[in-house]
Image (cartoon, rainbow, N blue to C red):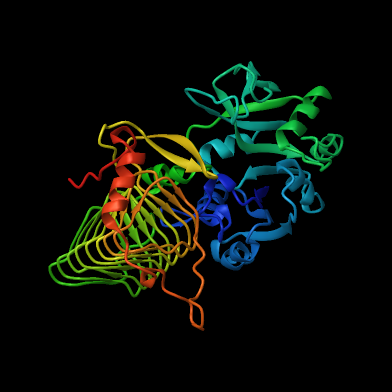
C-alpha cells in the first residue's frame, strides 16, 4: 500500500515554533511528529510513501532521506504555494498508485484503525469522535449506517460528533474531482481542500465508507504538543546511552542519548526523553513528560516539568520552566522563572498569530521561538508567546504576545550592541506596569510542588 502524506504547510497557528521548522518536524515524545506517523503507517502495512513538502522542506528531506533508515521507501513532491490540501494532493498525482492512503502530516491515528481503513473495499475516511466539535475549525461529518453523506460547511450547526481525522483511502477519481472545484476565497487563486473533493465524489454518487478511529491526535496548536507528549511517551526504543554520575537519580521511564552527561545531585523522573550531547545539572529536577533535544545545556538548580526544549538551547542556573515550549537555540538567563499557573486557578489564555486565544489548560507556561534570550532574573507570565530572535533585558517581566525587537549597533560601533548594555532597566516601573495591565484575573504563578 502507498500513502501520500501532506506535509507542506507551515502551520501558522504553531508560530513561532514553525518559523524555522516544518510543522511535521516539531519534536513530540522525543522525535519528529512525522516520524511517529510514518512508523504507525508502516505498522499498518504501508511500505511506500510520497511526502508533499514545502515550508522548510530541506530539513524534512535531509532527516528522512529515501526512508531506508526506517525500512520504507520515500519519494518527495514540492508544493511551492500552499493552496489547500486538495492542491497538495494534486501535486502528487503523477506518483499516485491506483489506490492509496492520503494523510495529513499533523495527525496521528492508531495502527489498527489505519489498517481497517486500508482494508475497506471502496473509498473510506477515518473519523474521530469528539465531545464538542468546533464548526469554525473542524470538518464535521454527516454519517448514516457507516457511510459518508456529507461534510458540513464551516460555521453550520454540527450534524454529528464525528470529524474528519485527516486520513482517507482514495483512488485516482479524486484527482478529477479536485480539478473540477472552482477557485475559492475570492482571491482568484485555485485554493482546493481535500474534503471539498470528497464532497464532489459524493455528488457523483461514489460511496465513501467511514471508519471511526480508536485513538487520534491532531497537532494544530502549540499546546497540542504538550498533550501529545503525555500519549507518545515513554520512549519506545532508547535506553540510558549517556553518562549518569554518582548521586544522580533516574526514576521511571527515562531515555538518555549518546554523549549526554547527567551531573551529580540531579533527579530525573520519567517519562522523560533527553537527546544526544546534552549536559544536565548538577542538582536539577526534571520530570513529567519532558522532552529535551540534542545539545541542550541545563544549569545548576534548574526545575523543568512537562515541557519541550528544542536543540541547542541553554537554560542557565536557578531557572524554573513549567508546561512550556522552548524553541531551538534559546538562552534563558540565570534565575529566569516561567510561571505556568494563574493565581485564580482559571484556565490560561495564550496567543495565536498575535491574537488572544483560549487554551482550555489549567497549566501553560511560555512558547518561545528560535533564538530567544531572556536576561537574568526575568519573569515570564503564563501563556506568554515570544517571537523568534527577541533579546530580553535583566529583570524584565514578559507577558502577552511579544514581537522580536531589532537591536541596532550603537553609532560608530561595528559590532552588534548587546541590548542589556543600552541603559539600566527600571525594575520597579516594569513591575508596576505588569500589575496595572495584568490584574490577578490575568496573572499567574508557577506551581513548584
Q: Tell me the residue at 42%/61% (across/down).
A: 310
Which sits in the foreground, 436 or 129? 436
Which sits in the foreground, 93 or 428? 428
Image coordinates for residue 413, horizontal then vertical, percent: 49, 82
**Quadrant occupied by the C terminus:** top left
Looking at the picture, does residue 194 appear above or below residue 34?
above
Which sits in the foreground, 261 or 356? 356
Image coordinates for residue 274, horizontal then vertical, percent: 34, 62
Q: Is residue 412 left or right of residue 395?
A: right
Q: Residue furthest left?
A: 247
Numbered circles on residues, count: 0
Quarter assignment of residue 156: top right
Q: Tell me the residue at 50%/54% (across/down).
A: 403
Q: Is residue 310 left or right of residue 199?
A: left
Residue 164 shows in this picture: yes
Looking at the picture, does residue 337 appear above or below residue 414?
above
Image coordinates for residue 63, horizontal then vertical, percent: 56, 66
Residue 121 shows in this picture: no
Image coordinates for residue 372, horizontal then vertical, percent: 43, 62
Amino acid at each position: 500500500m502507498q500513502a501520500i502524506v501532506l506535509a507542506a504547510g507551515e502551520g501558522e497557528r504553531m508560530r513561532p515554533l514553525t518559523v524555522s521548522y516544518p510543522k511535521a518536524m516539531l519534536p513530540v515524545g522525543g522525535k519528529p511528529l512525522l516520524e511517529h506517523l510514518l512508523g504507525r503507517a508502516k505498522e499498518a502495512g504501508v511500505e511506500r510513501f510520497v511526502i508533499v513538502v514545502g515550508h522548510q522542506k530541506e530539513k524534512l528531506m535531509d532527516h528522512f532521506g529515501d526512508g531506508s533508515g526506517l525500512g520504507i521507501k520515500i519519494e518527495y513532491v514540492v508544493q511551492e504555494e500552499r493552496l489547500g490540501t486538495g492542491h497538495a494532493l494534486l501535486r502528487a498525482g503523477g506518483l499516485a498508485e491506483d489506490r492509496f492512503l492520503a494523510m495529513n502530516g499533523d495527525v496521528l491515528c492508531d495502527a489498527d484503525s489505519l489498517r481497517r481503513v486500508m482494508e475497506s473495499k471502496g473509498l473510506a475516511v477515518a473519523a474521530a469522535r469528539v465531545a464538542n466539535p468546533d464548526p469554525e475549525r473542524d470538518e464535521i461529518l454527516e454519517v448514516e449506517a457507516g457511510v459518508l453523506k456529507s461534510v458540513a460547511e464551516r460555521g453550520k450547526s454540527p450534524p454529528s460528533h464525528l470529524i474528519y481525522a485527516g486520513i482517507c483511502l482514495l483512488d485516482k477519481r479524486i484527482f478529477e474531482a479536485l480539478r473540477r472545484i472552482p477557485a475559492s476565497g475570492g482571491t482568484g487563486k485555485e485554493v482546493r481542500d481535500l474534503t471539498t473533493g470528497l464532497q464532489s465524489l459524493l455528488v457523483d454518487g461514489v460511496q465513501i465508507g467511514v471508519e471511526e478511529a480508536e485513538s487520534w491526535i491532531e497537532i494544530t496548536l502549540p499546546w497540542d504538543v504538550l498533550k501529545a507528549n503525555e500519549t507518545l511517551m515513554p520512549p519506545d526504543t532508547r535506553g540510558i546511552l549517556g553518562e549518569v554520575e554518582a548521586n544522580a537519580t533516574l526514576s521511571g521511564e527515562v531515555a538518555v542519548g549518546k554523549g549526554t552527561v547527567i551531573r551529580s545531585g540531579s533527579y530525573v523522573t520519567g517519562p522523560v526523553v533527553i537527546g544526544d550531547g546534552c549536559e544536565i545539572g548538577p542538582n536539577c529536577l526534571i520530570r513529567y513528560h519532558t522532552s529535551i533535544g540534542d545539545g541542550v545545556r541545563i544549569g545548576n538548580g534548574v526545575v523543568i516539568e512537562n515541557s519541550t526544549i528544542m536543540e541547542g538551547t541553554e537554560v542557565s542556573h536557578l531557572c524554573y520552566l513549567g508546561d512550556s515550549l522552548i524553541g531551538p537555540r534559546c538562552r534563558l538567563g540565570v534565575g529566569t522563572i516561567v510561571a505556568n499557573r494563574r493565581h485564580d486557578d482559571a484556565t490560561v489564555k495564550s496567543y495565536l498569530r498575535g491574537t488572544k486565544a483560549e487554551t482550555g489548560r489549567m497549566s501553560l507556561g511560555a512558547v518561545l521561538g528560535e533564538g530567544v534570550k531572556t536576561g537574568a532574573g526575568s519573569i515570564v507570565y503564563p501563556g506568554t508567546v515570544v517571537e523568534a530572535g527577541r533579546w530580553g533585558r535583566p529583570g524584565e517581566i514578559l507577558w502577552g504576545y511579544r514581537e522580536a525587537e531589532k537591536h541596532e549597533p550603537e553609532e560608530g560601533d561595528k559590532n552588534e550592541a548587546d541590548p542589556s548594555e543600552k541603559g539600566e532597566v527600571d525594575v520597579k516601573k516594569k513591575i508596576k506596569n505588569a500589575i496595572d495591565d495584568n490584574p490577578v484575573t490575568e496573572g499567574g504563578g508557577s506551581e513548584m510542588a
